[in-house]
Amino acid sequence: MYRLMTFKEVVRIPPSLFGLKISEGALEILREQYERTVDKNYGIIVSLHNAKIQSKGKVLHGDGAVFCEVEFEALVFTPEVNEVVEGEITQIVEFGAFVRLGPIDGLVHVSQVANEFLSYDKKTGALVGKQSKKSVKKGELVKAKIATISLKDTIPNSKIALTMRPEGLGKKPIKKTKAEKEREKDRAG
């Protein structure tokens, strides 16, 4: 789930940024420090916006920088167990499928893709059902449920496990046009 959160922090704005508005300089420093980082309490910080200076800046003796209290907004991705998410399959490997969830990819283990045995087809780069012959491929949109979350100190070290086995999850059906529905009805009728 994405959340917009508000934070306050004292920011050191170096003289090299004095050509900008103080709020712009503060936002630049905060973005370098926090964007695309993981906070175990809040989640993955995606982007920062709307920096507002809360107090007059202070200059400390021997330091040419200005220290200001800044209030800013952060767009944070906070995954939750049992949350249903949608994403694009970014990679298929022998052991499962990676699904883009915004700032991080989650893994659907091959045993959690469908309620049947699946095998990896190297030729097509797909996971294919043994009985149904249904497949999932790179680029397809899917619905999945978050099974487990392990947020670590960085995005590459963090892991999200997904499942697509429950009813209503998996590959999103492509909606048929009215003409396609009528043709199917004529063929069946």
Image (spheres, rainbow, N blue to C red):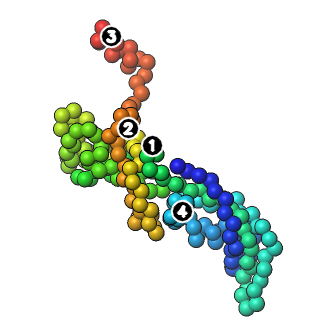
Residue 5 placement (x, y as % from top left) = 63, 56
Query: Which residue is identified by label 1?
Result: 84
Instruction: Examine the rendered structure and indicate whether residue 109 appears above or below residue 13.
Output: above
Residue 17 placement (x, y as % from top left) = 70, 75
Closer to the eye: label 1 or 4: 4
Q: Is residue 55 left or right of residue 6?
A: right
Residue 175 placement (x, y as % from top left) = 42, 27
Cα distance between the residues tagged 4 and 2: 28 Å
Residue 177 in view: yes
Cα distance between the residues tagged 1 and 4: 21 Å
Query: Which residue is identified by label 4?
Result: 41
Q: Is residue 79 left or right of residue 138?
A: right
Please say if the residues under marks 1 and 3 sit with CB atoms less than 8 Å apart: no
The three-letter code of the residue at mark 2 reads Leu
Mark 1 and mark 4 lie on one chain; the one further toward the N terminus is 4
Mark 3, residues whose alpha carbon is within 10 Å: few (<14), some, or many (≥20)?
few
Mark 1 and mark 3 lie on one chain; the one further toward the N terminus is 1
Mark 2 and mark 3 lie on one chain; the one further toward the N terminus is 2
Mark 4 and mark 2 lie on one chain; the one further toward the N terminus is 4
Mark 3 and mark 4 lie on one chain; the one further toward the N terminus is 4
- Residue at the spot x=78%, y=76% of the render? 57
- Helix, strand or loop at disc 4? loop
Q: In terms of image quadrants, where is residue 14?
A: bottom right
Cα distance between the residues tagged 2 and 3: 30 Å
Cα distance between the residues tagged 2 and 1: 8 Å
- Helix, strand or loop at disc 1? strand
Cα distance between the residues tagged 1 and 3: 37 Å
The three-letter code of the residue at mark 3 reads Asp
Give the residue at the far top of this rendering. Answer: 189
- Residue at the spot x=68%, y=74% of the render? 11
Please say if the residues under marks 1 and 4 sit with CB atoms less than 8 Å apart: no
Mark 4, residues whose alpha carbon is within 10 Å: few (<14), some, or many (≥20)?
few
